Amino acid sequence: MYSDKKNILQLVALLHEHNVTKVVLCPGSRNSPIVHTLSSHPSFTCYSITDERSAGFFALGLALHGGQPAAVCCTSGTALLNIHPAVAEAFYQNVPLIVISADRPTAWIGQMDGQTLPQPGVFNTLVKKSVNLPEIHTDEDEWYCNRLINEALLELNHHGKGPVHINVPISEPFFQFNTEELPKVRVMTRYQGLNIYDRNYNELIDRLNKYNKRMVIVGQMNLIYLFEKKYSKLLYKHFTWLTEHIGNQTIPGLPVKNFDAALYAMPEEMEEQMVPELLITYGGHVVSKRLKKFLRQHPPKEHWHVSPDGEVIDLYGSLTTIIEMDPFEFLEKIASLLDTKTPEYPRVWENYCKTLPVPELPYSEMSAIGSLIQSLPVKCALHLANSSTVRYAQLFNLPSTVEVCCNRGTSGIEGSLSTAIGYAAASDKLNFVAIGDLSFFYDMNALWNGHFGCNLRILLLNNGGGEIFQTLPGLDMPNNSHRFVMATHKTSARGWAEERGFLYQRVEDEGQLAEAMKLFTQPEFLAQPVLMEVFTNKEEDARLLEDYYHQLKQQ
């Protein structure tokens, strides 16, 4: 029988799945649930050593013999510090040593409770990875705990071998050993490149080909990658390809981009049909909250993430495989190895999304963004500020020749304008900026620096506050305090824009928008940069967005 502590069960199960078999056990009460569970499992060869300093070096010797990882487990407090010399030696000898330390609950560190000191990160730069496990009370805790352990164990042999530290907070009672079996746990694997002569590589391709419902999601990529036609023909028909405007032209074939609206409109009885069995991701951030929610609630059987750095990115909560290589090289390598069958799954997604209407809206923030996108010159750069702007833009079709930029690394509103102006200063084509009022006024000093030219055109959407907050559930707050959340104001950019040398356009209705947009989007360079300020009503903007989604539900 094993401990009832779920973080310990996850740890021991994953040590077993990652083929760790040799463990040095030091005495103590706080680590007794870990010791009991490890020593009770037949897969582990356990060694009892009292002195932690000696135990650490003994485990180092076990790992040196054959190069396989070995673990040492100690109790809380200074017991852990005594392993430090062995950790340093393991780091400089590149030995895969796993240090497992029991710990007091976080709340009791520094409160004069016995055998307590700040254990997470205690080895600093002398370990390749240090993780502090949560005590598990919810499903999200369990997912997080599983991910952390996988990350630590994968790092034992990532760009060279070395030690890792897994800290395990444990609350009393310690001695409840009533679990009959270790849980079935998610095991992550990492491929560092793909070698066609590698048996593991062949196994990966076999797994790829066994699935009929395969989806690729491409996050933000600030580049253009043109696949050769031979690869596009081989790849396109096998996958459902989802991306957003910020993904730019990095997909072999025509992507599905209106999936956020599609997920909103999707009948519940259709959801299971649309869930992938295999999900492959590359690129950076994804804007759509609905896509994240959909895949977290309906997890695929496998999720592979492909990236040059090989980092563990578990955005959808179902990551199983990390492939450390350039994603385009990966796609081109697997293209000729895909089976010859043409699955129906990609066509189901494409046909469903084709039925959704492009918004035809009365005068509003959304119609202004739609008007801009539909009028853009064939080749230009479009900079989208965060919050409402980047989400509204996704509702409209955008030519693949338009380059899209957005600060989605942290998704903050600060710096959107400064980043766009910096980009435009180094660019020889027209640069259009779509930005909300809070983002603009927050970053209005971007116009102060003077490093901009006639290739800059700014569409400022001014509805007197943070309109996106209107859509938050439960915003009907007492004491009218929602005005602080939305930062309502009555500010115009006219004086600042004209003082900084911009041609200023003021827009207050649909007719003015259509007329101003002709000049704003004309492909020839003008004598000065342009700022178009579009005034709308935030309550009306929120209502129109709600009406559009209601219309989708009726489809």
Image (cartoon, rainbow, N blue to C red):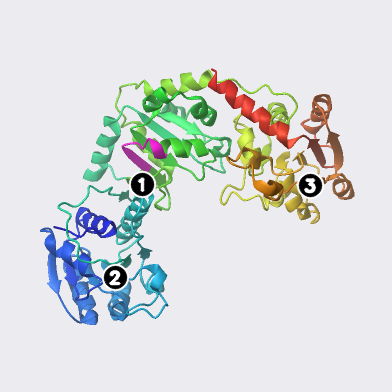
For badge 1, the amino acid type reads Ile
For badge 3, the amino acid type reads His
Residue 191 at x, y percent in the picture: 31, 49
Asked if residue 527 can be seen in this view, the reply is no
Residue at mark 1 to residue at mark 3: CA–CA distance: 48 Å
Residue at mark 3 to residue at mark 2: CA–CA distance: 53 Å
Q: Is residue 53 above or below residue 440?
A: below
Instruction: Locate the N terminus by quadrant.
Output: bottom left
Residue 535 at x, y percent in the picture: 80, 36
Callout in the foreground (1, 3): 3
Residue 423 at x, y percent in the picture: 68, 48
* Cβ atoms under marks 1 and 3 closer than 8 Å: no
Which label sits on residue 323? 1
Callout in the foreground (2, 1): 2
Residue under pointer 2: 101
Report the magenta residues as a range.
Answer: 296-304
Q: Pick whichever of labels 1 and 3 is earlier in the sequence.
A: 1
Residue furthest to the left: 42
Residue 30 at x, y percent in the picture: 26, 72
Instruction: Locate the C terminus by quadrant.
Output: top right
Residue under pointer 3: 489
Secondary structure under tag 3 reads loop
